[in-house]
Image (cartoon, coloured by chain):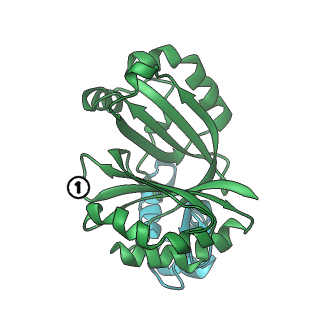
Amino acid sequence: MYVCLCKGVTSQTVSEVVAQGASTTKKVAKACGAGSDCGRCRRTVRAIIEAALMAPETR
Amino acid sequence: MRSLVIASDYRVPDPTRVPQLLESRKPALADIGAHHVIVHASTIDHGRVLVSIAVRNRQPIVDLLRSRVFFEWFDAVGVEDIPAVFAGELVDRIDLTDAADSWPPGVIVAAMTSVPDVSSVIEHVHLALDRFRAAGIRKTWIFQAFDDPREVMILQEIGDENSARRWIEDPDSAAEWMENAGMGAYPPLFVGKFLHMMRIDETD
């Protein structure tokens, strides 16, 4: 899924940076650019962060 | 020239305005190579729509999605938070209908999700066609994403609301993709009906 249309960042990339420790939308934006331009994808970025927090392997 | 489908699932203040707004954007959609736009409206979640755009275009997908057409579209329909967008191609289409049972239009159940292996999903579906038919499944379209080979969008047309409800509550084991819908960037399962189709000619 393309999450950030401005920067062309996919959900796979966002998930990777979240797995590497980006735990807020600001940290994700800094790590891969998603949400750093118009910011209208931040809700989806938050959903990816929340899903990662709920995943059993990250508990 | 590459054929692709761009789809997204989001909530709009008034789904009945979507066809008219699409018509007013025909020239812009023609500019990006769109040739068909299909809109489904949710029957269980008012305001939710699934919009699928079939495109023929030479541009890299990222450049296409970055074009103003999409931002202007979301502005026009009143969508502030831009949803995740699926971009991929049709990899399988299964039609289980006879001429007699293809009318009236059925219920669409759509899932965008990640699966371990798309080719094994296709194989499992083909082995389960008799069970799919018995469950009321008329058609199945499987799209595979360009950006992630494990990502799919799977649309199924089911005969009626009751069969769709039963299928969602207790899907066949071959419909493994239904389990993970709604996680992370993926929207929850979409259940709806056809609302509008717009054909766009190159001259539009």
Quadrant assignment, res B57: bottom right
Q: Position of residue B123 (x, y in %)?
A: 64, 25
Check the picture and name the quadrant holding the C terminus of chain A: bottom left
Of all chains, the one bearing label 1 is B
Q: Quadrant of residue B135?
A: top left
Q: Does the image show residue B31?
A: yes
In the depicted structure, whether residue B193 falls above or below residue A27: above
| Residue that lies at the very extreme toward the front in this rendered image | B203
Residue shown at 33% from the left, 75% from the top = B78
- B32, above or below B105, in the image: below
Q: Residue at x 59, y 21 (%)?
A: B126
Colour-to-chain, cyan: A
Residue shown at 50%/55% (left/top)? A58
* Residue depicted at x 45% and y 16%: B131
- Residue labelled with disc 1: B46
Q: Position of residue B140 (x, y in %)?
A: 51, 33
Q: Residue furthest bottom?
A: A37
Say which of B191 and B68 sits in front: B68
Which quadrant, please, contains the N terminus of chain A?
bottom right
Res. B117 in view: no
The green-coloured chain is labelled: B
Q: Position of B91 compared to B108: left or right?
A: right
Q: Quadrant of residue B1?
A: bottom right
Name the side, left or right, on which B192 lies relative to A22. Answer: left
Three-letter amino acid code at the position of disc 1: His
